[in-house]
């Protein structure tokens, strides 16, 4: 199917906007993967901290981000998209400096939570600015390229993080964000035009945002503390029951609230609904693998952090390379088929790692499996975003992007929590511990995502060129 011609000047402007916004989002995307590599160094810096406590260095960022992303989208329409994007970058940059200076695990967790708030301001606006800059027939290309930027940044995270730890320590990974933030603020001020809604939107349900934070946080707390305190512990049981209950009450409240924090009306769009389910499930598998992988390489194989970082890099490299292409292919042939193909490839990579699990190094098998998984995840990420925005009207793009990012953050938190729960501190040199169970979970996430993509395709899918 041939696409309609687009004014070259419009496309040049769109690509310029994409480049500048990508520069702004580079620091946050890299942070997502760097933190998994420096996790091993954090253990050495804070030997008194338990595995559960250390996991909150990752999860405080993702959970706070999940609870505040929708608010960030609304604030952007009230304050102006450029202003909000710049505010988010400034907050993230300052929080990064605070994390680098943190003397203890508690302050580090707090700084990471503040980073999550900064990301909530910048990410929805960055996505909305990019999507709005591209014409309708090229929106999948723009979304795919924007996703690819994040994937490339994430691809650099393991190797860059490992190098920084090798020459310094984990604090250097946070200092790295400071110059990126300053440069991004300069270019955004010069290139991006201010835009806000003609009518000032009201703030959504503030209690609803707190309920997201409480519900997801309680469930993650129950998971990560269950190994240390046991499932029978009263606090673990209360969190395990209370978390889902709070989220169920949120769903009930959202259907009745005039301005819900997550608009149930968005889920009446079939592609958006299926895409978000896929985003949640695949995020659990993808981010769970990062923690499982770094533990496997450093604890079982006893590799150095820099060696482990290099061996984790292929999955992010191929994710980055394929994300941009999958966005273009989604424009031409529809994204659902690529969600299915990519998810099955991811599942194959995880099954391969499961079958070849061993206390002895097998670098060839590892590289081949993460390459297959990386190619698969590259197809999935770009195509999932294309699926989600396919049938959303322009007025819903900012809030829809926020919900999608919320699903990714929730999946990130659950993936890390489940990995900590299953693996815990059971690994030792030459001993694979509970890694086999972890890989069953990682492979199952890909299989479920494939099923969701197949359902979308069988119900008509997203037709080529329909990404609006």
Image (cartoon, rainbow, N blue to C red):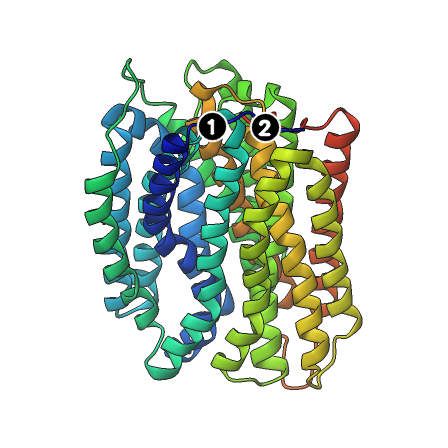
Specify the label residue 3 is tagged with.
Answer: 2
Picture quarter containing residue 200? top left
Tell me: 147 left or right of 203: right
Question: Could you tell whether 173 is left or right of 457 in the image?
Answer: left
Q: Is residue 283 above or below residue 196?
A: below
**Between 173 and 18, the one nearer to me in the picture:** 18
Residue identifier under label 1: 6
Q: Residue 293 in the image: x percent, y percent?
A: 60, 69
**Mark 1 neighbour density, 10 Å: few (under 14) some (14–19) many (20 or more):** few
Residue 244 in the image: state x and y as whole percent. 58, 37
Residue at 31% across, 18% down? 202
Q: Position of residue 302 (x, y in %)?
A: 58, 85
Q: Is residue 6 visible?
A: yes
At 48% from the left and 66% from the top, the residue drawn is 36
Residue at the image point whose x is 49% and y is 45% from the top: 145
Q: Which residue is found at the position 74% from the left and 43% from the top?
A: 340
How many marks do you count on the picture? 2
Contact, mark 1 vs mark 2 (Cβ under 8 Å): yes
Secondary structure type for disc 1:
loop
Secondary structure under badge 2? loop
Q: Position of residue 174 (x, y in %)?
A: 31, 65
Q: Is residue 237 visible?
A: no
Relative to 56, does residue 133 appear above or below in the rendering?
above
């Amino acid at each position: 199917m041939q696409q309609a011609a687009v004014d070259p000047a419009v496309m040049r402007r769109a690509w310029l906007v994409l480049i500048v916004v990508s520069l702004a989002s580079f620091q946050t995307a890299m942070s997502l993967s760097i933190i998994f590599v420096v996790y091993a160094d954090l253990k050495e810096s804070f030997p008194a901290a338990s595995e559960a406590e250390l996991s909150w260095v990752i999860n405080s960022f993702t959970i706070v981000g999940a609870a505040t992303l929708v608010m960030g989208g609304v604030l952007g329409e009230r304050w102006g998209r450029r202003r909000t994007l710049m505010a988010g970058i400034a907050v993230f940059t300052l929080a990064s400096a605070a994390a680098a200076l943190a003397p203890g695990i508690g302050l580090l967790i707090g700084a990471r939570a503040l980073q999550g708030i900064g990301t909530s301001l910048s990410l929805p606006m960055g996505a909305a600015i990019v999507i709005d800059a591209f014409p309708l027939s090229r929106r999948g290309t723009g979304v795919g390229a924007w996703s690819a930027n994040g994937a490339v940044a994430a691809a650099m995270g393991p190797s860059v993080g490992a190098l920084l730890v090798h020459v310094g320590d984990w604090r250097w990974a946070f200092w790295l964000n400071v110059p990126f933030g300053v440069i991004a603020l300069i270019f955004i001020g010069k290139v991006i035009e201010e835009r806000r809604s003609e009518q000032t939107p009201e703030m959504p349900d503030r209690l609803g945002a707190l309920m997201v934070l409480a519900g997801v946080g309680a469930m993650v707390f129950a998971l990560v503390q269950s190994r240390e305190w046991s499932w029978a512990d009263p606090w673990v049981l209360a969190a395990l029951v209370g978390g889902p209950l709070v989220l169920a009450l949120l769903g009930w409240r959202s259907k009745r609230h005039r301005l819900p924090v997550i608009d149930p009306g968005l889920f009446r769009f079939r592609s958006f609904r299926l895409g978000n389910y896929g985003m949640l499930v695949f995020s659990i598998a993808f981010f769970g693998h990062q923690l499982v992988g770094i533990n496997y390489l450093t604890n079982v194989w006893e590799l150095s952090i820099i060696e482990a970082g290099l061996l984790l890099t292929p999955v992010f490299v191929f994710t980055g390379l394929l994300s941009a292409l999958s966005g273009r292919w989604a424009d031409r042939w529809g994204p659902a088929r690529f969600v299915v193909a990519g998810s099955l490839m991811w599942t194959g990579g995880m099954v391969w790692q499961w079958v070849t699990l061993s206390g002895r190094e097998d670098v060839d098998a590892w590289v081949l499996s993460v390459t297959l998984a990386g190619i698969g995840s590259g197809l999935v990420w770009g195509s999932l975003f294309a699926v989600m925005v396919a049938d959303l009207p322009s007025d819903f793009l900012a809030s829809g992007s926020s919900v999608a990012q919320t699903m990714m953050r929730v999946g990130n938190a659950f993936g890390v929590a489940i990995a900590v729960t299953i693996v815990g501190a059971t690994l030792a040199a030459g001993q694979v511990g509970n890694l086999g169970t972890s890989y069953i979970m990682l492979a199952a996430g890909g299989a479920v995502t494939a099923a969701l993509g197949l359902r979308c395709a069988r119900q008509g899918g997203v037709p080529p060129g329909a990404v609006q």
